[in-house]
Image (cartoon, helix red, strand yellow):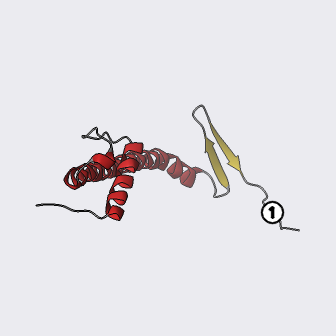
Amino acid sequence: MTVTFSAEERSDKTVYIHEAMAQGYTRMLKMPLHLLSDEQLRDEHGRAWQFFDMAGKAAKAKAEAEKAKHDQHRNGFEEAAKPLIKWLAENVHPHHTVIVTSTNAELLEGICHSPLKNS
């Protein structure tokens, strides 16, 4: 099937290919884009589209992996905190708080709290 692009369509496809190249796409045909036949330009544009499609899928997979890792950390944190929360509930009153760092834990008691009002 013969493909015929208008000058505007050729320009749009060329711009799209250049955008893909700026993102790391390597062209299959090394001759300048303006010398490609319409069929060659269609094929090169299709490969550039596939490049963007695969990059999008890779970005989505990376985001899903990061979310899974975050969820795992959050779940681990919640499991680690439960015994301390239980201890607080059973041993001190609700005005106590705990600050935990990687090297110590500090039990604090709130005696007085007065929020400051904006003047």
Camera sees residue 30: yes
Residue 6 image point, x, y percent: 30, 65
Q: Which of 16 and 2 is in front in this view?
A: 2
Q: Where is residue 42 in the image (x, y as percent from the top left)?
A: 23, 55
Q: Using the rendered image of the protein, determine whether residue 23 is visible from the camera's viewpoint.
A: no
Identify the residue at horizontal 25%, vertical 52% (top origin): 41
* Front-most of residues 54 and 105: 54
Q: Quadrant of residue 22?
A: top left
Residue at 77% from the left image edge and 55% from the top image edge: 111
Q: Give the residue furthest to the left.
A: 1
**Quadrant assignment for the N terminus:** bottom left
Q: Residue 31 appears in which quarter of the rendering?
A: top left
Q: Horizontally, is 29 left or right of 66 in the view? A: left
> How many marks can you see?
1
- Left or right of 5? Residue 80 is right
Q: What element carries label 1?
A: loop
Relative to the observer, which residue lies in front, 81 or 42? 42
Instruction: Identify the residue position indicated by label 1 in the image.
Output: 114
Determine the residue positioned at 73% across, 54% down: 110
Q: Locate the C terminus and report the quarter of the image it occupies.
A: bottom right
Q: Residue shown at 58%/50% (left/top)?
A: 91
Residue 9 pos. (x, y %): 32, 63
Q: Which residue is nearer to you in this view: 25 or 98? A: 25
86 to 119, vertically: above or below: above
Quick check: 70 left or right of 58?
A: right
Crowding at mark 1 (Cα within 10 Å: few <14, some 14-19, many 20+): few
Report the amino acid beneath label 1: Ser
Q: Most extreme residue toward the right, as rendered?
A: 119
